[in-house]
Image (cartoon, helix red, strand yellow):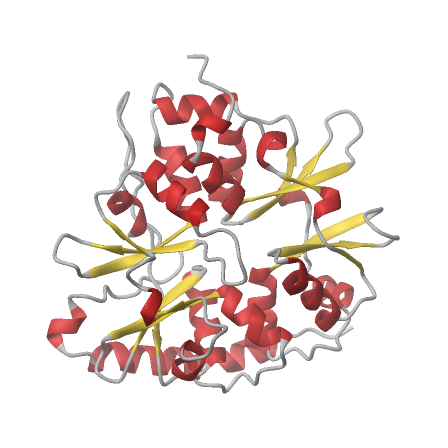
Amino acid sequence: FFSFRPSFRKTLAPALHRSARMATQMPPDEERCLPSSRPHGQKLAPPHHPRGASALVAEIVGQHGKALCNGSGTLRDAAVVLMLTDRTAGIVAGSQGRVIGAITENDILQAYSKGTPGDHPVGAWLLSERARMPGVFAQALSVGARMEITEAGRMMRAHSSGDLACRHLLVKDEAGHLQGILSALDLARAVCSLSPESELRCTMDAGTVSQVMKPAGAIPACRESATMGEAIEKMVGSRQNCILVTDGPQHFGVMGVFTTRDALRAFAEGIPLNVEIGHWMFCLNHRMAPRIVAADAPLTDAAAKMASGSVHHLIAVAGDTGDVVGVMSSSDLAQAIGAPERTVGCSC
């Protein structure tokens, strides 16, 4: 077996240099509209909300850093920046520092599935019909920083279907300056900061993973001997952000889950699409245990597991047998936050 990590390190340095150079060249007026990136790991203390209070988008969006990408940079550069900042979407700035859109993990997944070369310009991708968050969509996908997270969840729910479904929102302050990009995982983190007595926290405590997860049969699956290209094609074709990897037919013998984050890393490393997916996951010491959650666990427990592990997908298992019964994503949780009336009512 061989490791792919050295290729990622080689890709890292030039991409970082280009991103840093772009940030220093931005004009002062636009720099105020584009907050600087904060490296992964440098995080602020999460806000605590007293009884009855609800979290605001402004309190969440800046807690875990921001990704800034250059429109003249490459898709591989963008993938590396998203990996380093541990974000699922990044703000894209043009030659004059102005926002021209955003690049997401799903953009990279689409590019990877079609064999798009890593040196394809980000700006050119945003002009293509496959882009998830081009500049022309900015207004429709923008929210105010003072919006409550339940309303943000409703907006994510409204944009969750279709070929160009988007699970991110652009956050602007009262002056219209872009503050960052809100992801579904950010909403999971927000739930963890709520007071136990708050209405939303109480609703999430009463709801369970099984109520919002996708059943295992609805999630694409592939054998560990399948190629990366075959697995990614199934993900794109089923409009799912993950695929179960098994050592048996259909959904028997689940060994792990391959997600858009894994595809992002593989694209950044330049992994060929004909590499076996099980082999690649083995080389990365891919473990399923941190992603396992009981199907009858409260939604707050699932949110805490996502937030602490910075993962968007959990594998739900039956409490009595340990069999895999479904997958819960941060998007599923965000939709539950946006539609609490569809979740078990509060018992507090």
Residue 281 as seen in the image, left or right of residue 248: left
Q: Say if 237 sits above or below 152 in the image.
A: below
Residue 35 as seen in the image, left or right of residue 345: left
Give the percent coordinates (x, y) of residue 179. Answer: 24, 58
Residue 134 as seen in the image, left or right of residue 255: left
Q: Residue at x 28, y 20 (%)?
A: 51
Query: Farthest residue in the front direction?
Result: 162
Q: 275 or 160: which is nearer to us? A: 160
- Residue 112 falls in image quadrant: bottom right
Judge whether residue 5 can be spotted in this image.
no
Judge whether residue 205 can be spotted in this image.
yes
Query: Farthest residue in the right direction?
Result: 249
- Residue 239 falls in image quadrant: bottom right
Q: Residue at x 57, y 85 (%)?
A: 117
- Residue 189 falls in image quadrant: top left
Query: Farthest residue in the top direction?
Result: 348
